[in-house]
Amino acid sequence: MAIPLPRKIWQTLGAIKTGVILLILTVILAAAGTLILQRPATDPDEIQRAYSPQVLRLLDGLGLTDVFHAWWFVLLLSLVSLSIVAASIQRFPNAWRFYARPYKSPDEAFRKALPTHKLIAIKDEETALSAAERVLAKKGFHPERIVRENSFSLFGERNRISEMAVYIVHASLLLIFLGGIIDAEFGWRAFLSLTRGEQSSEVQAQNGPKHFLPFAVRCDGAGQENYADGTPKKWWSNLTVLKGGREVLHKQIVVNEPLVYGGVRFYQASYGKTGKVDKLVLTATSRQSMNPKDITLGLNETAALDPDTTVRLAEFIPDYVVGDGQVYARSNDLENPAARLVVESKKSGQAINYWLPAIPGIEQNALSPYDFQGKDVQMAYFTGLEVSHEPGQWGVWAGVLLMGLGLVVVFYLVHSRIWVVPVRDARGQLQLWIGGAANKNKDVFEQRFSDVVKQIEWELKPSQPEISQTSVAALTEK
């Protein structure tokens, strides 16, 4: 009789071979996701430098640059999960029957077939069973008296939960895969770049949509620590979370120590120069009074020099070059800085372009009622944050913890069983049959079984009567 197709598919899914093949594929593809640069976690320029255009197009087309969100990876996780469920359902009834109703009263055929057993000659059933019961209790086997119509016996066991360890591991894998599927479908990764004092509630996914957060993140400061040779040691950012206009959380983050709020994680990903000025400190000297005055300006900030005159920092170029009567930025490095100040007079309504340093043909410094001299400059830096929302992480971490528990049960707990049955041999002599079995670590169990047997034999030795000192004295007198 042919097996119906749905049942055949179900049996195939539950086969150990199918599960092993799917797990191997999952591990291989997950490894590929760690070896191949992934979007959006990797800067696009870095990916383009790492791979040729043809290879990059192939990787993008196959989804290998975003493995953990690819539809085929989600499908593979679903198939592995379905295979685990099918295998568990198909095998669970027998496993549960073995766990819930252990074999406690061995018949003659079982006793003959059991390789680990021992026979001890005894005189009295009750005495022998009581001695064995004491020994099993000391050894942690929790002995139980089995009473049948015409017989008595003992059954003891340790760590029966070990028989269910495989289902603990199965449950942990299902939780991990469920978390991965949820993250792939509903999670996202994006980037956020902030300068000091800047805040945002929008993050931009690479080659994807913007995500709007129910709160804002502000950068209160960022920096870089270097080794003695000048190479970067670490980047850090001081972040503040604002919700409803209130500051609700402050934290300094570094690499691998993110800020977590509302299920969203902010990782320190990069740090660098913006090429823009943060603060410019100047000394302004009036040409009439010759009194110097220190002022501090940010880009497009205005300061009053006197009741009628103001100055504004209109432009700052960290590394300038002049060409065709124009001032250009050659780089974002602070190598050859130039600043354009706009000095305005309320009386005349005149706006004068004052350049530091003076650039012939462009500056109007001579028309300014004030002279300016640069005193200090602070350049603006940005902090690059990787932002991730991973709603399935609870499943992943719960699965990892559960797997740890399952592996402890698998490797360190052994289901050991011992039976003790009074029997008679072919000549009718009374003997105590002791048998044992373990589901793994058979050599270790055999040693433990041997210790149990020796202890029972010791318990059954007839006690030697003690001779009192009075008896010894009486015998000596005689």
Image (cartoon, rainbow, N blue to C red):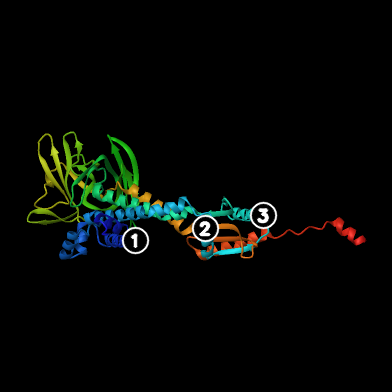
View extreme (left): residue: 324
Query: Mark 1 falls on what kind of element?
Result: helix
Q: Which is nearer the N-term, disc 2 or disc 3?
A: 3
Task: Tell me, for residue 232, which label it has, or none.
Answer: none
Q: Which residue is mark 2?
A: 416
Dot 2 or dot 1, earlier in sequence: 1
Does the residue at mark 2 contact the one at mark 1 (Cβ under 8 Å)?
no
Closest to the observer, 24 or 99:
99
Q: From where the camera sits, is residue 453 visible?
A: yes
SS class of the residue under badge 3? helix
- Check the image and report above or below for 428 versus 257: below
| Other-residue count near label 1 (Cα within 10 Å), few / some / many at <14 / 14–19 / ≥20 | some
Residue 163, given in percent of the width and then of the height, sits at: 45, 55
Instruction: Give the quarter of the figure containing the C terminus.
Output: bottom right
- Please give the residue where the numbered disc 3 appears in the rendered image: 127
Residue drawn where x is 33% and y is 48% of the image: 393
Nearest the eye: 93 or 63: 93
Residue 16 disc label:
1
Q: Quadrant of the N terminus?
A: bottom left
Of the image marks 1 and 3, the number of the one nearer the N terminus: 1
Left or right of 162 in this view: 381? left
- The amino acid marked with disc number 1 is Ile
Residue nearer the viewer, 262 or 182: 182
- Toward the viewer: 99 or 430? 430
Secondary structure found at label 2: strand
Work out whether 303 lies above or below 431.
above
Q: Position of residue 447 (x, y in %)?
A: 56, 64
The Cα–Cα distance between marks 2 and 3, rounded to whole angstroms, is: 24 Å
Q: Mark 2 Cα within 10 Å, few/some/many (few <14, many 20+)?
A: many
Query: Is 25 situated left or right of 456 in this image?
Result: left
